[in-house]
Image (tube, helix red, strand yellow):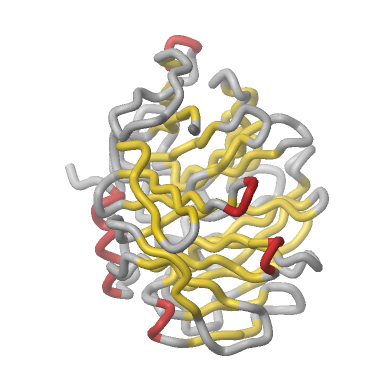
Amino acid sequence: MTSRVSRYTSIVATAAAAVLAACASTATSRSAVTTAGSAVATTTNVKPFFVRDGFVAPEAVRYDPDQDVYFVGNWGPGPASATDNNGYISRMRPDGQIETMKFIAGGANGVVLHAPRGMYIVGDTLWVADADAVRGFDRKTGRKLANVDFSALDRGFLNDVAADATGTVYVTDTGKNKLYKVQGGPTLVLADSALGAPNGITWDGANRRFIIVPFGGAHSLRAWVPGTTTLTDITTSTGAKWDGVEVLAGGRILASSQADSSIHIFDGATGHAIIHTQGGPADIAVDTKRNRVAVPVVALNHVEIYQLP
């Protein structure tokens, strides 16, 4: 059986358009939560605080501090690039219990959702990158609010979303080395091989810039200021094939590296691995109330939660 994550790695690196499906458990019982204590993650050998099984190819997590809940995006069965309308988003509580497994689901309540990738919250809208669109949902009710169609564009792999200080949402296209502005219809704002197969993106409010991480193999993370056409290398580490990225309090940066299955922390011009994950880490989220990081692992159908140092 070929895992979706291995094919996902191949896709975004080569700008191909297909990913194999992996068989996955959909158990939702309380026994699916494994707790390993609350040791602070000071070495790469740290054990997860808990591991939550029962998802189907979870690629991204987003923490909502207002509701104190994690949103977990599941590709669902089938190829990640397929427009099969069987993806869904779960609501998970901080203790690992599933509040609603299919809080937002393709094919239910008029929702179209194929394979949710990166997510970002602006006001009461949960923005979600999908195979052929960027979609908006009410973060409290799951009601569909917006649909920005990318199907007519020369897209590769729409991957992660983030918003600037004005609430304007942007999405990366890993397969085509592009960055789009979402609102008002897709608007191409940057097309440059220097993006290096852009994967994760997040807003760095203190410096009024986006942090964009390359999946193409580079070790450095990059910054882009809206309205400009150039990227700047800002920090580097031993990791590569970067996926998720978050800015922490105090300006430190957290990023997931699929090259070494690790979470790296950056402070200034350099970074280092602080957590070795059980599988390839995808799009991470930071629980700002508990100082934890949530790590989805597509191939293992679970989410790992670690205490941050």
Closer to us: 268 or 281: 268
> Where's residue 112, x and y in %?
62, 55
Residue 81 occupies quadrant: bottom left
Q: Please tell me how many numbered marks the rendered image carries.
A: 0
In the image, residue 226 sits, relative to residue 73, either above or below, namely below
**In the orientation shown, which residue stands out farthest toward the front?**
268
Q: In the rendered view of the protein, which quadrant contains the N terminus? A: top left
Q: Quadrant of residue 79?
A: bottom left
Image point (53%, 68%), residue name = 132
Query: Which residue: 30% across, 48% down?
Result: 21
Residue drawn at x 45%, y 24% is 40
**12 and 308: which one is in front?**
308
Most extreme residue toward the left is 1
Residue 291, image x and y in percent?
59, 32
User: Residue 111 versus residue 169: which sits nearer the camera?
Assistant: 169
> In the displayed structure, would residue 119 be above or below residue 74?
below
Residue 188 image position (x, y, % from top left): 60, 85
Identify whether 88 is placed above or below 127.
above
Question: In this picture, is 83 found above or below 279?
Answer: below
Q: Residue at x 54, y 63 (%)?
A: 201
62 horizontally vs 115: left or right: right
Residue 278, horizontal then vertical, whole percent: 29, 33
